[in-house]
Amino acid sequence: MNCRKHTRTEKYFIQTFGCQMNVHDSEVMSGLLEQSGYERASAPEEADLILLNTCCVRENAENRLYGHLGNLKPIKDQRPETIIGVCGCMAQQAEQQERIRDKFPYIDLVFGTHNLHRLPELIQEIKQTGVGRLFEVWAEGERAEDLPARRDNPYQAWVNIIYGCNNFCTYCIVPYVRGREKSRRPEKILAEVERLAKEGVKEVTLLGQNVNSYGLDFPPAKSMDFPDLLAKINKIDGISRIRFQTSHPKDLSDKLIQEMAEGEKICEHIHLPVQAGSDKILTAMNRKYTREHYLNLIRKLRAAIPEIIITTDLIVGFPGEEEADFMDTLSLVQEVGYDGAFTFAYSPRAGTKAASLPGQVEEEVKMERLHRLIEVTNSLAKASNLRQVGKVEKILVEGASEKRPEIYSGRTRGNKLVLFDPTTHSRIKRAEDLIGKEITVYIKEGLTYTLKGRIVE
Ligand code: SAH
Ligand code: SF4
Ligand code: F3S
């Protein structure tokens, strides 16, 4: 018997954890669901289908997920016909599948990162055959092309260019849950960006765990690389800004630096995770570059693109990290003078090489180093923002701030967030009409995380 029959339009709610890959995967799942007749719900309580798109890069991401799962139990108790699913990176891990199977009997559906295009069929299977719980996780798989995506922002879009990762940094779970590198065909990427441009998108962000290895898996090898792809996207009419993430320092080529300098739509920002400042730790992390190689890249980037904004990721407390190694990280951070940084305490991930290395650092030491590092990165971020004061910058307007709707924000090409008062634009009657437009602002103030600007006409 089909007890999940509805006469009204069914609603879905997706909660996303993790990085931009997951955010974009959620957009694709939303697109698939809307294509099959679902509408978006504004809260899980109103939804007939609730999906949690998970991340497992650090332990706290996992803990947050299990907290959320617990919160969904009352919804299932009240409305047993609600379908609750877990997908994304955590779902790829056998031990998490077991945990969900045993401890969370009210989860109906588990699927992974390689078969998210199967979502509509999986839901149909649950509904029609009354199979009860359905676990379908593929170990590897080719991502289907031409999937729809529902974007919240009509002017900015994420575009996958390469899936998976081959690098196996010893701390990282991503290669295990996202599989091996697989570049998308350039003609598919270009067609997608052209379509987005026609739909009114101004800014595209090209996504990959390591965009610099784009194309290396094509036969014949190196027939098309990342700088070639950028050059082609740079020619697409309607797109005014191109961003990309993430760049691995070991593969950042002179050709890419040159393309960044020459491609007028390529934004003057690079996110270049360094992770650590000591060669001993970089080797143990299997990052395949030295401190000197990294610093040399920074010099070359700044020589070619003097106004470039440079951000990074840093890990403290990797196994074997001693005070002297940590001081190397601090000194590298100072030497580069980052404009911004994401800082993390090392979190052992089962199945990765580093989790079983000797010399695991005590939690207390990790926290103490993290705080010292954050103090430095925050003061550098503030200094970077103060350096922007007095500049005149183009920003792409994103919209009103949630908490203070009278304040609008937009990003500079260097990816700095600028807050401004939209009512001072003489030719625009309604503030909302500024959204999606590139406007010129004078930077009048620099705070730790944001800039304040004034519209210039
Ligand atoms: N592919 C990207 C980002 C991957 S995950 C890259 O190579 O840069 C994002 C960041 O999470 C990493 O850059 C790293 O700083 C951090 N990270 C990954 N695994 C971690 C772990 N086990 N503990 C703490 N931080 C981790
Ligand atoms: Fe993880 Fe390293 Fe791959 Fe980035 S490059 S996803 S840190 S293994
Ligand atoms: Fe997390 Fe998966 Fe991204 S583990 S960081 S959501 S690739």
Image: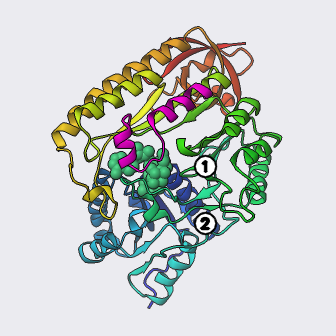
**Residue 177 among those drawn in magenta:** no
Q: Amino acid at mark 1?
A: Val
Q: How many neighbours does mark 1 have within 10 angstroms: few (below 14), some (14-19), or many (20 or more)?
A: many
Kindly check if marks 1 and 2 are in contact, taking CB atoms under 8 A apart as contact.
no
Q: Which dot marks residue 32?
A: 2
Q: CB of residue at label 2: within 8 Å of ligand 3?
A: no
Q: Residue at x 49, y 18 (%)?
A: 384
**Spot occupied by residue 447 in the image (x, y as percentages of width and height):** 44, 17
Q: The N terminus is located in which quarter?
A: bottom left
**How far is the residue under mark 1 from the one under mark 2?**
26 Å
In the structure shown, which secondary structural element does the residue marked by tag 2 occupy? helix
**In the image: residue 421, left or right of residue 374:** right
Tell me: residue 319, above or below residue 140. above
Whether residue 152 is visible, yes or no, is yes
Q: Which residue is mark 1?
A: 211
Ligand 3, by image quadrant, is bottom left
**Res 318 → quadrant:** top left
In the structure shown, which secondary structural element does the residue marked by tag 1 occupy? helix
